[in-house]
Image (spheres, helix red, strand yellow):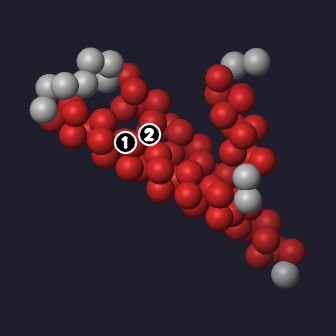
Amino acid sequence: MSKITESRKNLQAKDVAGLEAEVKALQKAHFGLRMQKGTQQLNNTATLRSTRREIARAKTILAQKRSADAAAK
């Protein structure tokens, strides 16, 4: 199984509060990477892209769960 599939399954297993915490942690990590890039300390700039995509993936699943909860009410 690929890393993306495992990541997606891990995110789908979390509840809304867990996803919100995950998004916040990913955004904090992305900010740190951007600061490292700005100070010429970041060696692998591909990590910026992957963290951006992870944030988008988590936000998408979070939106799906929120809409499912709203539809259930």
| 51, 32: nearer the viewer | 32
Q: Which residue is painted at 31% across and 23% down in the image?
A: 45
Residue assigned mark 1: 30
19 vs 45, left or right, is: right
19 vs 28, left or right, is: right
Question: Quarter-wise, where is residue 10 in the image?
Answer: top right
| 73, 32: nearer the viewer | 32
Residue 13 in the image: above or below residue 52? below
Q: Which residue is painted at 75% across and 38% down in the image?
A: 9
Q: Position of residue 13 (x, y in %)?
A: 78, 48
Disc 2 is placed on an element classified as helix
Q: Residue furthest right?
A: 72
Residue 16 in the image: above or below residue 5? below
Residue assigned mark 2: 52
Disc 2 residue type (three-letter): Arg
Which image quarter is the C terminus in?
bottom right
Residue 28 in the image: above or below residue 42? below
Disc 1 is placed on an element classified as helix
Q: Which residue is painted at 71% across and 28% down in the image?
A: 5
Q: Which residue is painted at 65% across and 64% down in the image?
A: 17
User: Given this view, does label 2 or label 1 mark the residue nearer the observer?
Assistant: 1
Disc 1 residue type (three-letter): His
| 1, 68: nearer the viewer | 1
